Image (cartoon, rainbow, N blue to C red):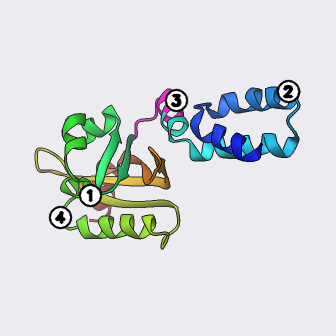
Amino acid sequence: RRAVLSLLGMVVPVCECGNVPFARGLLMRGFTVPETLTFLIAAPIVNPIVIITTHQAFGFDDGILIAQDGMLRFVNPRMAAITGYTEEELLARPFVDFLHPEDRQMVFDRHVQRMRGELDHEFSYTFRLLAKDGRAVWVETRGAVNTWNGKPATINFLSDITERKRATKELMR
């Protein structure tokens, strides 16, 4: 039963605000506390639908993307706004095409190492994207290794920190 509840937690999109009532319902239907905890642990951590919808529901200004097999598999409208590319353009080319040339190898290497389990599954670091108009866009990415359509992927939340970088550089003068 625990395996089924864990699987249920991974595929049923219940956000954090819905997990507790759902878990209470499981308890009322005769599931044990350890079985219910299995669902509570799996749902918000593993289900990328929950992560994306919860993030979007609360109106954060971050770009969201899922990277898998060298491609972007999902991008939200904010990613298009940050880069100047359409969502379709972002999904049609390898993700390294959108990285600033000076940061391309570092970001790619970290992605590959993370997918191999050689780096922490959760991460945060800064790098530059290359916008459609050619300008560099500094971003901070936070994310984790996850599963997308049954295969390993990274889910990434990107904040445009270009203005912060510019202001910091200005203060350093």
* SS under mark 1: strand
Q: Please check the rendered image and state whether residue 171 is part of the magenta-colored stretch, yes or no.
A: no
Name the residue carrying label 2: 29
Residue type, mark 4 in image: Pro
Mark positioned earlier in the residue sequence (2 or 1): 2
Cα–Cα gap, marks 2 and 1: 51 Å
Most extreme residue toward the bottom is 118
Where residue 39 sits, quadrant-wise, is top right
Cα–Cα gap, marks 4 and 3: 33 Å
Name the residue carrying label 3: 58
- On screen, residue 100 versus residue 31, left or right, reads left
- On screen, residue 171 versus residue 17, left or right, reads left
Residue 57 disc label: none
**The N terminus lies in which quarter of the figure?**
top right
Q: Residues within 10 Å of mark 1 (few under 14, many from 20)?
A: many
Residue plotted at (45% across, 69% down): 116
Q: How crowded is mark 2: few (under 14 residues within 10 Å), some or many (20 or more)?
A: few
Name the residue carrying label 4: 101
Q: Please check the rendered image and state whether residue 59 is part of the magenta-colored stretch, yes or no.
A: yes
The mark lying in front, picked from 3 and 2, is 2
Q: Residues within 10 Å of mark 4 (few under 14, many from 20)?
A: some
Q: Which of 11 and 81 is in front in this view?
A: 11
* SS under mark 2: loop
Q: In this view, does 86 lie above or below 143?
A: above
Residue 128 disc label: 1
